[in-house]
Amino acid sequence: MKAHKLTAIFFIAALLSGCSQTLWISDNFKSAKPNIDNAVIIFPELEFTEREGDTKQIRTPHSVFVSKTAAEAVKEIINEGNFTVKKADVYCDTLLVGKWIRNQFSEAKNKYTQMRDAVKQSKDKKILPASDELKSLISKANSDYIIVITGLAYGTSEQGKRDDIQQLETFDLLYDHAFPYDYQWNGLQLQISLIDARTMEILWYNYNKEGNSNYDPFNKDEVKNLCSKLMKPE
């Protein structure tokens, strides 16, 4: 395929990706806002997959690290005074996290989809379906307001990176100019929600789309940068 055709394809793909993030705020948020002093961040279950070509492999230790990094980043942003909630702590059920590890974080993607669908399904009041697991966590966290983080992260295997570099070099050799596309070797998509723990109503929600996911999930500064963009005061 000729270079100008490739450039056109990638330009169209960028347009189709749409806005980088989508903020949603409940009608009940304004009335609740003055009472939201503290919230508990439920330790997230974020899936990390390593990609090589069309194959993906969940990497459990990486998933634990990325989950912890995202939770800490959100906590820091809140405690630095850069969000509606004034103070936050992270609640982590170590027994449950141990279960996630044994199951290789296999439910993380389902939780990501569930959160996304809960926001899409209703134009007005949005209720997060609470699984028994989430109900238990909320009960143990003992807070009127909770922050739920779901997400997907990925990195490219070393072999995958070498293949991409070889393709770049081959293109440069054949066409005598750079390949019209920058490979993305890392990615992070997050959904952050502020939930009324008593009603499970989603009061505030934001996420970044795949077209704006070029963040290194192992770099805390980049993770915090993404979370800061998502959590800008409304």
Image: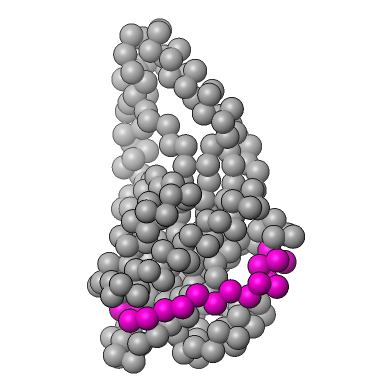
Residue visible at 53% across and 62% down in the picture: 68
**From what the image shows, is residue 18 above or below residue 133?**
above
**From what the image shows, is residue 20 above or below residue 198?**
above
Q: Is residue 202 visible?
A: no
Image quarter of the N terminus: top left
Residue visible at 53% across and 24% down in the picture: 162
Q: Which residues are the magenta region?
A: 84-100
Q: Position of residue 177 (x, y in %)?
A: 31, 13
Residue visible at 35% across and 44% down in the picture: 16
In depth, the one of 115 and 234 nearer the eye is 234
In depth, the one of 211 and 223 nearer the eye is 223
Q: Position of residue 192 (x, y in %)?
A: 43, 67
Extreme-right residue of the structure = 102
Residue visible at 58% across and 74% down in the picture: 92
Relative side of 168 to 142, left or right: left
Res 47 quadrant in image: bottom right
Count of all numbered marks drawn on residues in the image: 0
Q: Is residue 110 visible?
A: yes
Res 169 quadrant in image: top left
Relative side of 221 to 64, left or right: left
Magenta stretch containing residue 40, yes or no? Answer: no
Magenta stretch containing residue 96, yes or no? Answer: yes
Q: Position of residue 207 (x, y in %)?
A: 40, 61
**From what the image shows, is residue 164 above or below residue 47?**
above
Extreme-left residue of the structure = 234
Q: Position of residue 133 (x, y in %)?
A: 66, 77
